């Protein structure tokens, strides 16, 4: 089966060549074609262009039946790539949300057994089937807002059995969901209560037991560490990353959410695909990132929900860096996977131009999860993950009109998806 989508008001993020990401001034570049068509054959983008060039006869040799869709007044965007989520979890944490309203800090809640440790307790009590079913519903909701690729982290297990349980659930999601999914081992998300006072012992457990077994079962694409004030040190992060690299896991880092932690620099040193959060990013951190292939990834939902200082996105772009943005969908600090809202926050809160914001949640976030050669742009030969909007007046309307769902039809792997 294939599709011809014609009379598209604007076909957005078209790119004739495979590119890695857009950085600095280039983030203002958002190619699009007005009054366009798009042809999908199998699971790939086959062709596109302006309607003035369109001829049905060009596709007579295509063996698949091509269904014609009229997109008059509507736009087509590549699906969002959400490169940072924690959507395998059990239960919500709205009581802590009230504690935050009352003035307790993230660190204070964590010290008394809340936060990540609360989620770890609940996850321990949940079955794999329960976790899978809940996460699948979250994926479907995310897809309904235009997301086509998701990185999912472990990290609510904090012991061998439960970390493996999370990663096996993520593997089931990969096998069952039409979304593109990457798996990230985040055993170093917090220190379990039984290791309080013996943090190095927990780091030893991650290095000597968890990583080798996870690699042997091929359960993760990435290894991650929460390198920040009150969590894991630079030295501990280095030990974990080196072991992950030894076993074929690409590094990623939770960095500088709570303070200047050295997390960005250690991420760059070990070739991390991305460093994420970045609320505390200064000139030294920017300089380190400028000489690397590491993608700075900002999580607007977490900063908004926790009322944290904002990452200096404008300063980073002006310095020549690329920026990706992701949802950080999790029960404690960002309980939303709506990437349309992330797109809006990129403009409203971080003052990105709409073109920069679209690049941040498509091409650049595809790079941040290692799928830029498959997703993130409308390019011949890439996987056909895209959505058709409802009738909208302009590209700028996508971030401008926050709160409503502007997606009308979803296509993943070349197939029309209905939930």
Image (cartoon, helix red, strand yellow):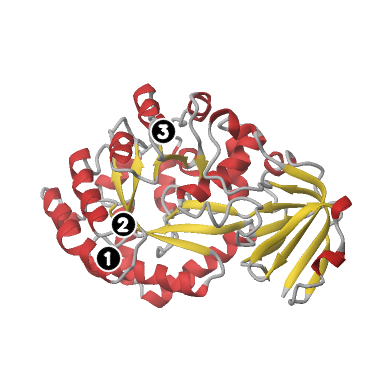
Query: Would you name the residue on which mark 1 appears?
Result: 215
Give the Cα distance between marks 2 and 1. Answer: 8 Å
Question: Secondary structure beneath disc 2?
Answer: loop
- Sequence-wise, the earlier of marks 3 and 2 is 2
How packed mark 3 is, by other alpha carbons closer than 10 Å (few <14, some 14-19, many 20 or more), is many
Q: Is residue 402 left or right of residue 205?
A: right
* Label 1 vs label 3, nearer the camera: 1
Please say if the residues under marks 2 and 1 sit with CB atoms less than 8 Å apart: yes
- Percent from the top left, x then y, of residue 276? 41, 42
Q: Quadrant of residue 216?
A: bottom left
Mark drawn on residue 279: 3
Q: Which is more toward the observer, 332 or 163?
A: 163
Question: Secondary structure beneath disc 3?
Answer: loop
Asked if one can make out residue 117 in the rendered structure from this viewpoint, the answer is: yes
Please say if the residues under marks 3 and 2 sit with CB atoms less than 8 Å apart: no
How packed mark 1 is, by other alpha carbons closer than 10 Å (few <14, some 14-19, many 20 or more), is some
Position of the C terminus, as image quadrant, is bottom right
Query: Would you name the residue on which mark 2 appears?
Result: 249
How packed mark 2 is, by other alpha carbons closer than 10 Å (few <14, some 14-19, many 20 or more), is many
Q: Which is more toward the observer, 37 or 350?
A: 37
- Percent from the top left, x then y, of residue 12? 71, 47
Q: Residue furthest top?
A: 283
Give above or below for 395 relative to 390. above
Asked if one can make out residue 389 in the rendered structure from this viewpoint, the answer is: no
Residue at 38% in and 24% down = 282
- Percent from the top left, x then y, of residue 288? 35, 29
Give the Cα distance between marks 3 and 2. Answer: 26 Å
Mark drawn on residue 246: none
Q: Is residue 131 left or right of residue 164?
A: right
Position of the N terminus, as image quadrant, is bottom right
- Sequence-wise, the earlier of marks 1 and 3 is 1
- Sequence-wise, the earlier of marks 2 and 1 is 1
């Amino acid at each position: 089966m294939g599709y011809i989508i014609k009379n598209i008001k604007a076909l957005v993020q078209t790119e004739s060549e495979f590119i890695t990401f857009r950085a600095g001034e280039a983030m203002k570049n958002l190619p699009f074609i007005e009054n366009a068509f798009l042809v999908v054959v199998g699971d790939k983008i086959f062709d596109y262009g302006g309607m003035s060039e369109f001829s049905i006869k060009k596709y007579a040799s295509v063996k698949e039946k091509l269904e014609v869709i009229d997109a008059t007044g509507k736009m087509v965007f590549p699906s969002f790539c959400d490169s940072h989520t924690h959507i395998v979890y059990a239960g919500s944490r709205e009581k802590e949300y009230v504690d935050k309203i009352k003035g307790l800090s993230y660190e204070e809640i964590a010290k008394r057994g809340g936060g990540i440790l609360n989620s770890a307790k609940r996850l321990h009590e949940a079955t794999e089937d329960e976790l899978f079913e809940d996460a699948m519903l979250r994926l479907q909701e995310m897809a309904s807002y235009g997301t086509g690729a998701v990185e999912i982290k472990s990290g609510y297990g904090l012991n061998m059995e439960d970390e493996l349980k999370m990663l096996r659930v993520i593997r089931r999601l990969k096998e069952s969901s039409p979304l593109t999914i990457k798996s990230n081992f985040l055993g170093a998300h917090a220190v379990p209560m039984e290791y309080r006072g013996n943090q190095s012992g927990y780091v030893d457990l991650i290095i000597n037991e968890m990583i080798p077994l996870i690699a042997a079962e091929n359960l993760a694409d990435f290894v991650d560490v929460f390198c920040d004030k009150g969590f894991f040190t630079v030295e501990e992060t280095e030990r974990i990353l080196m072991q992950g690299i030894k076993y074929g896991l690409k590094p990623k880092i939770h960095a500088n959410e709570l303070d200047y932690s050295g997390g960005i620099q250690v991420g760059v040193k070990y070739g991390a695909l991305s460093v994420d959060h970045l609320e505390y990013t200064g000139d030294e951190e920017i300089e380190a990132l400028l000489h690397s292939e590491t993608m700075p990834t900002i999580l607007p939902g977490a900063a908004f929900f926790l009322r944290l200082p904002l990452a200096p996105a404008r300063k980073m772009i002006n310095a020549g860096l690329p920026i990706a943005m992701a949802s950080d969908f999790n029960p404690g600090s960002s309980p939303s996977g709506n990437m349309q809202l992330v797109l809006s926050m990129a403009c409203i809160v971080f003052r990105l131009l709409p073109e920069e914001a679209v690049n941040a949640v498509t091409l650049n976030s595809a790079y941040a999860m290692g799928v830029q050669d498959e997703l993130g742009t409308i390019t011949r030969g890439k996987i056909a993950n895209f959505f058709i909007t409802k009738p909208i007046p302009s590209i700028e309307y996508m971030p401008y009109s926050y709160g409503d769902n502007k997606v009308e039809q979803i296509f993943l792997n070349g197939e029309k998806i209905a939930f």
